[in-house]
Amino acid sequence: MNKALRNPLIYIVFILPAFVLFLAFFIYPIFTAVNNSLTSWNGISKHMTYIGLDNYVTAFKDVAFWKSVRNNLYFILFSCLIQVPLIVIFSLLIANVKKLKGLYKTAVFMPSIMSTAVIGILWGFIYNPDFGLMNELLGIFGIEPIYWLSDKNWAMIAILITNAWQWTGFYIIMVLAAILSIPKELDEAAAIDGATGFQRAMKITLPLIMPIVSVVIMLSVAGAMKAADIILVMTKGGPAGSTDVMATYMIRYAITSFRHGFGNSIAILIFIFTMIITVLYQVLIARRSERIEY
Amino acid sequence: MRALKKFIPHIFLMGYLLIILYPFLFVLFSSVKTDNQSIAANPFGLPSSIMFDNYVNAWVNAKISTYFFNSLYIGILSACVSILFAAMLAFAVTRMRYNKISAIVFQLILIGMLIPNNSLLLPIYGIMRNLDILNTHMALILPYVANAIPFSVIILAAFMRSLPGEIEEAAVIDGLSSAGLFARIIIPLTIPAVVTVFIVNFLGNWNEFLLANYFLSSNELKTLPVGMVGFRDAYNTNYAQMSAGIVFSVVPVLVIYAILQEKIIEGVTAGSVKG
């Protein structure tokens, strides 16, 4: 028995391929990123000059860097303040309808499985000032055409709308699954006591789904820090840096203008900022929402 | 009155459905129109005459077919390899008797879920250059396989843990080695989880943009999302043709989704890999 399941050679052979790849593509890159972030390396030459924390100082002094941080914050705020309430409302609505539930469930999730790049192209067409759907719709209400992606007051909003279009349904499905797993008896008992549908949603369902809502907030914050492809495809960070996020800022410097060392310092900052937000959120909010047992 | 009350949620939900679905219809309608003028003239509806030339042009001239098959084979190959490696590791960690080492290995792999992928883009670019495989498909396959490992291990390990321990006893008494146990007993029993993980990995690879965009430069090697962006940049004056390209890249995913809807939702939400 133990002999078959305690064979060190087989154990190593089974663990090795995945483990080596994991070390090579997750752990080792973190260390090289830290190392390169302390250099003025251009990414090509064999020679590396260590310059200490200069790259970080440069980043902190750069107005464009803080602009990109601010845009990451917009992503976070937009998802917490606008998307999350919508997610909860739509999940409650879908959970409580009897007809067409399957249709709603299938359709809302659809955008989340598609390529962000293709969604970026699709929405770029929708935002097209001359033939796009958005301005045609505005035209019906007599509103002047908006240059969505080339006007720096609108470009960020246009991207946030597209991002919300892609991901809202994904979270609705998560919240919906939580709502549907609440035992029916709770709701029925309240209904017998004379609670209206709205009261039941506010007093029973909502408190019970708070843990999953908390997970949704955490995931959308993590998603906000990851956002890059949608911006690269739709605006490339423009106009005039108005849609840059940390990741696109990093790519611009590291790959397009060969400041590899500097780019790596931004990578480390993305890593640190994400960790800080995650830990803060866990300590301040997630711990307070207790786990609920039925 | 009661009937009306029942109807109100549907009004909101139908509104949401319209917002989700109309962009697809808009692109579908635009893809069979002759040119930009006919799109501008009637943006909301079907054109007076339906034209399929855009599809032929996109598929043949713009090489959408090449991109399509590149994406297909890279996506399938990477997903299969990462599942094989992840399943082997998950088996060793959950079923073989090395509890202390296994706990450490598993915890380490879990950390992988926390690391923001963006911050690894540059160092991985460096690794690919040192290996001298930039601008080959290997430059995508290797990181795709590696990236999928944490999620795959977590799901497969959870599933393997739930299998009863008597299975091993019976199998070992019948003379199977641990490798035989893995290949002939555990893997067949784990198929439902393997299918879910495969779809999630495949969709992730099929949709990936950042690595594909920066690691490959020759046109023949590009994947569909990157090819589509290049196609848009080259033809951005012809929205009808671009729409046909979008339809080509969206339809396969929608077909897979239509068939495997439940499994996809289950797998993607279990991993919660993106947002």
Image (spheres, rainbow, N blue to C red):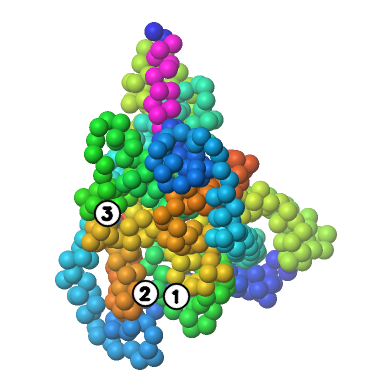
| Mark 1 burial class by Cα count in 10 Å: few <14, some 14-19, many 20+ | many
Kindly indicate the quadrant of the structure image that contains residue A225: bottom left
Q: Nearer the viewer, residue A188 or A293?
A: A188
Who's the residue at 49% across and 66% down the image? B212
Q: Indicate yes or no whether the magenta region holds residue B230.
A: no
- The answer to whether marks 2 and 1 mark residues whose Cβ atoms lie closer than 8 Å is yes
Chain hosting mark 2: A
x then y, percent, for residue B85: 62, 66
Image side of residue A223 versus residue B247, left or right: left
Q: Nearer the viewer, residue A160 or B109?
A: A160
Highlighted magenta segment, given as a residue range: B3-16
Mark number for residue B23? none
x then y, percent, for residue B202: 58, 56
Name the residue at the right extreme.
Answer: B174
Residue bearing mark 2: A255
Who's the residue at 45% across and 58% down the image? B235
> How many angstroms separate mark 2 from mark 1 (CA)?
10 Å
Who's the residue at 37% across and 43% down the image? A132
x then y, percent, for residue A148: 28, 48
Q: Indicate yes or no whether the magenta region holds residue B5.
A: yes
Image: A250 above or below A87: below
Locate the N terminus of chain B and report the quarter of the image it occupies. Answer: top left
Q: Amino acid at mark 2?
A: Ile
Residue bearing mark 3: A150
